[in-house]
Image (cartoon, rainbow, N blue to C red):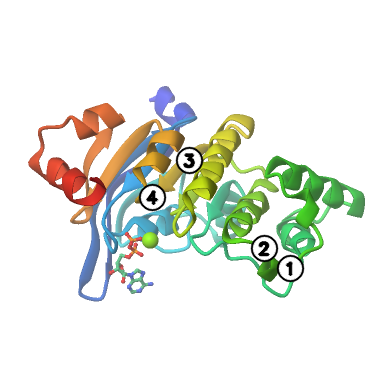
Amino acid sequence: MNHESKDIVISIKGLTKSFGSLSVLQGVDIEIVKGENIAILGRSGSGKSVLIKIISGLLKPDSGIVKVLGQEVDKISAKELQELRLKIGFSFQNSALYDSMTVRENLAFPLVRNKRDLDKKAVNDAIEEVLNEVGLLKTINQMPSELSGGQRKRIGIARTLILKPEIMLYDEPTAGLDPITCIEINNLITKVQKQYNTSSIIITHDLTCAKNTANKVAILMDGKFLSTGSFEEVFNSQNVNVKTFYDYNFI
Ligand code: ADP
Ligand code: MG
C-alpha cells in the first residue's frame, strides 16, 4: 500500500468517457510508476487525446478513478487542480503557441501567470535556461510564425519545462515532421526524461518514436487497453488483435 502512494504517478481504474451516444473510453485501466515512459498507440479516434486530457484535468471522466500524483483529478477543488496541473506538462499536437507573442513572451507567460513571486531577472534566467535545453536560444525574439514545425514543437516543450513538471504528456509529438526532425524531437523527449526526471506518456503513430522514447507500450482499442507491457511483450503477443493492429498499422 505504501508502495502505491509513493511510486505510482498515474493510476487509472475503470475509466469511462462518452460524448453523447459516442462511447470513447469503456473501462481504461493503467498504472504509471515514477520514471516510467509509456507510449500509447491506437487508431485515430480511439480516445488517446481524450485520455490525456482527462489525466491533465482538461476533461472530466464519466466514471472510474483517475489519480495523478496521488490526487483524484475530478474530486479535488479547482485550486488544487490548478496546482496539480503545474506539475503536468502538456505538449499539444499543434504546439499551441500564442501567435501574437514572441518566443520570449510565450515562455514568460506560464511563469508570470503561475509564479508571481519571481522577479524579472529570475523569469529571464528561466527562459534562457529552457531555450538552451531545447537548443533554440537564438529564436528568443522571433514570432512563432517565423519558426519551422520542429522548432515550434520544441518551443512548446520548452514552455512546459519552464514550470519543471513531474509528468509530461506528449500528444503526437512527431506528427507531420520530416524524419530528421522526428529524431531530434525523440532525442529531446529522452533528454527531458533524464534531465527533468519526468515520467511521461507519449501518444504516437510512429513506432520509432515509441521505441526511442518509451520503455513500455500500451495499445488503446475499442475503449480499453488491449495490451500493455514492454515492446517485446506486446508485439510478441499471440493476441490476435495485437497482431492485427501491428500488421495493419506499422508494416
Ligand atoms: P485520438 O485517439 O485520435 O486522439 P480523440 O481522443 O481525439 O482520438 O477522440 C476520440 C473520439 O472522441 C473521437 O470520435 C472524437 O471525435 C470524440 N471527441 C473528442 N473530444 C470530444 C469533445 N470534446 N466533444 C465531442 N466529441 C469528442
Ligand atoms: Mg489525438
Q: Circles 3 and 1: CB distance less than 8 Å?
A: no
Q: Are marks 2 and 1 in contact (CB under 8 Å)?
A: yes
Q: In the figure, 82 relative to 72: above or below? A: below
Between 216 and 56, the one nearer to me in the picture? 216
Residue neighbourhood size for the residue with mark 1, other residues' Cα within 10 Å, grouped as few (<14), some (14–19), many (≥20): some
Ligand 2: does it lie within 8 Å of the C-beta at label 3?
Answer: no
Secondary structure, mark 3, is strand
Amino acid under label 4?
A: Thr
**First in residue order: circle 4 vs circle 2:** 2
Residue at 40% across, 29% down: 4
Judged by depth in the image, the label closer to the viewer, 4 or 2, is: 2
Whether residue 74 is visible to the viewer of this picture, yes or no, is: no
Point out the frontmost of discs 3 and 1.
Answer: 1
Locate the C terminus and report the quarter of the image it occupies. top left
**In the rendered structure, are the residues bearing label 3 and label 2 in contact, judged by CB atoms less than 8 Å apart?**
no
Q: Position of residue 22 (x, y in %)?
A: 22, 71
Three-letter amino acid code at disc 1?
Met
56 vs 83, nearest the viewer = 56
Residue at numbered disc 2: 147
Tell me, for residue 204, which label it has, or none: 4
Q: Secondary structure at mark 1?
A: loop
Secondary structure at numbered mark 2: loop
**Which residue is label 1 attached to?**
143
- Secondary structure at badge 4 equals loop
Residue that numbered label 3 is attached to: 200
Instruction: Give the spatial CA distance, label 3 vs label 2.
Output: 26 Å
Whichever of labels 3 and 1 marks the residue nearer the N terminus, that label is 1
Q: Is residue 71 visible?
A: yes
Kindly identify the amino acid type of the residue bearing the numbered disc 2: Leu
Q: List x then y, in percent, for residue 50.
A: 37, 61
Residue at the location (57% across, 50% down)? 89
